[in-house]
Image: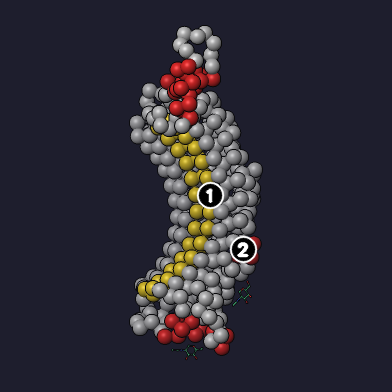
Amino acid sequence: MELLVVCVALLFSGSGGAQETPYEDYMAQLKACPKECRCPPSFPNAVYCDNKGLKRIPVIPPYTWYLYLQNNLIDALSADALRNATQLKWLNLNRNKISNEGLEEGAFRALPNLVHLYMEDNQLTSVPSPLPSTLEQLRLSRNRISKIPVKVFAGLGRLNLLDLQGNKLQDDAVTEVSLKGLNGLVQINLAKNQLSSMPPGLPPTTAQLFLDGNNIEKIPAGYFKGLPKVSFLRLNHNKLANGGLPRNVFNLSNILDLQLSHNKLTEVPFIPPGLEHLHLDHNKIKTVNGTEICPVSASSLAHYFEENGPRLRYLRLDGNEVKPPIPWDLMLCFRHLRAVVI
Ligand SMILES: *[C@@H]1O[C@H](CO)[C@@H](O)[C@H](O)[C@H]1NC(C)=O
Ligand SMILES: *[C@@H]1O[C@H](CO)[C@@H](O)[C@H](O)[C@H]1NC(C)=O
Ligand SMILES: *[C@@H]1O[C@H](CO)[C@@H](O)[C@H](O)[C@H]1NC(C)=O
């Protein structure tokens, strides 16, 4: 729609006039589409430079909001490269060869409007810094990141998604200090790193915590005290045994989805009343006693209407030592159960 208005205005402004109008400026910018890239007229603010074998960032026109540079061979980002692209909201640099050495200090400083920064599958060893305070999503999965610089997230109160999966983070890198400033965080993905403890200092806004594929053996009692919003918790492929899980540690009022597949559990942990999906497959669970794992007592259960009872709908128990049939007291307690994989 915007482009249409521009074209009409240009027709009526006449050609050959000496004075520059904003519209002519705009059209000049359109024509300034880098020769390596595509700038479809239907998306006048998007510049597509993906899959071109580029080694350097082309000269990006100033009007650009969306810049797609994924799947190239770019190994460096100078502070100058995006200097004129001050309107940039969305920068996709996935699948390039950018290392921290190739990233000039302040490369993102000229981007006061950047909302999404994607740098998956590069060669970063540290979270890039400084980052624009406008960021809402930062995707850095599958790099070689082992360091989170102190205060890198200070002032990033709008960041709601931080994806660091598939890196080399150890416990000493993920600390209360290094995560400070993430006051609006909703989802944090630390899967497939080298953590042996639960990350400390997560903000109370955290709703989705993904920690699959680490070496976590235990969850400290009270770990979730400061995390009342957690609703999706994934800890598949860790080393959790029942000794490492304080009783009722998962008694979280907002939890909906709990995944503990491929651990070392020998017993079913406490099932919070609001939980809807529970993955316990591929552990070492031998028996399931529906009466014992029922989050409400049998006597009060009789008084529950189906709507008020425990919410569990989906339960996976395959890959354990539990044999069918499904215990009748399990069905009695969890009346919303629609599928049990045993
Ligand atoms: C930025 O814009 C200036 C003025 O139009 C131009 O001379 C310069 O080459 C541009 N730089 C980049 C990196 O696009
Ligand atoms: C779970 O937490 C609620 C409050 O959030 C509490 O009332 C209840 O007793 C707890 N249940 C267990 C079994 O710890
Ligand atoms: C399950 O546990 C309850 C209470 O501890 C017990 O009374 C019951 O016999 C157990 N059920 C089975 C099948 O072992």
- Which quarter shows the C terminus? bottom left
Residue depicted at x 48% and y 36%: 91
Residue depicted at x 52% and y 58%: 209
Residue depicted at x 42% and y 20%: 31
Question: What's the residue type where badge 2 is placed?
Answer: Pro
Question: What's the residue type where badge 1 is placed?
Answer: Leu
Disc number for residue 161: 1
Which residue is denoted by mark 2 in the rendering?
Answer: 228
What distance separates the C-alpha of mark 1 from that of mark 2? 18 Å
How far across and how far down the image is residue 128, in percent? 54, 39
Q: Residues within 10 Å of mark 2 (few under 14, many from 20)?
A: some
Which of disc 2 and disc 1 is earlier in sequence?
A: 1
How far across and how far down the image is residue 183, in percent? 63, 50
Q: Is residue 210 above or below residue 162?
A: below
Disc 2 CB within 8 Å of nearest ligand 2 atom: no
Say which element carries label 2: loop
